[in-house]
Image (spheres, rainbow, N blue to C red):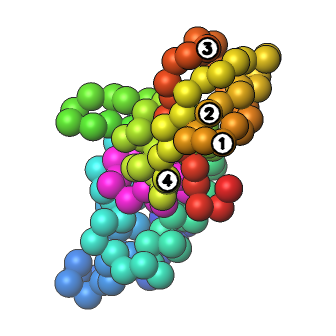
Amino acid sequence: AAEVRAMLGLADLLDRYPRQMSGGQRQRIALARAIAFPPRVLLMDEPLGALDLKLRDAMQIELKRIQRELKITTVFVTHDQNEAMTMSHRIAVMNDGEIIQVSSPSEIYNKPQTRFVSQFVGKSNFVEAAVLRQDGDRLALAVGDHEITARHDAAVTAGGKITLSVRPES
């Protein structure tokens, strides 16, 4: 208990009532209760949802530090895409209760497997194209009256149709 108290900086809060604490302090107390007897898996459902942006950012840093120190596997549920990308080693994107893609944050963003995933984690423009030919990881594509090349790591069929996802920063 003393180790958790020191790790979370709770010594000055132990004699206070919840109504006398800030949102962040209450979150730290709740986290201390959850890890007092270190669990094998820590389940967190929208733990930062009620906090203001500044406090949310600070708590993200704190949660990552604690997770690293205690080496606890954590399932972190959030609807905030930025929070998910920041807090996670692996992300499961769900739609209507179905898992659509499980990957690293980088792969979720850069190689979304569906249009839904692409739109869920950032802004995207979609362009329909016809596959002219494939040479290794390069595709020759017809987009309207233009021929372009793009990298692609899956086999596609010449004459088939694909949808390109283009991020604004591309």
Query: Measured along the vertical axis of the image, is residue 32 above or below residue 14?
Result: above
Q: Quadrant of the C terminus?
A: bottom right
Q: Which residues are magenta?
A: 76-89
Query: Which residue is identified by label 4?
Result: 124
Would you say the residues marked 2 and 1 are in contact, meaning their CB atoms lie under 8 Å apart?
A: yes
Going 41% across and 39% down the picture, which residue do you hit? 115
Mark closest to the chain's N terminus, 1 or 3: 1
Query: Which residue is identified by label 1?
Result: 146
The three-letter code of the residue at mark 1 reads: His
The three-letter code of the residue at mark 2 reads: Ala
Q: Is residue 143 left or right of residue 38?
A: right
Query: Measured along the vertical axis of the image, is residue 61 above or below residue 79?
Result: below
Task: Decide: few, some or many residues near mark 2? Use Cα within 10 Å; few <14, some 14-19, many ≥20.
Answer: some
Mark closest to the chain's N terminus, 4 or 1: 4
The x and y percentages for residue 42 are: 40, 41
**Can residue 84 be seen at all in this image of the molecule?**
no
Task: Work out how far the residue at label 2 is from the one at label 3, CA to CA, in angstroms.
Answer: 11 Å
Q: Is residue 8 left or right of residue 48?
A: right
Q: Nearer the viewer, mark 4 or mark 2?
A: 2
Mark closest to the chain's N terminus, 4 or 3: 4
Going 20% across and 84% down the picture, which residue do you hit? 19
Task: Decide: few, some or many residues near mark 3? Use Cα within 10 Å; few <14, some 14-19, many ≥20.
Answer: some
Badge 2 element: strand
Q: Is residue 28 left or right of residue 104?
A: left
Of residue 8 and residue 72, the one placed in the foreground of this image is: 72
Q: Nearer the viewer, mark 4 or mark 1?
A: 1
Query: Which residue is identified by label 3?
Result: 158
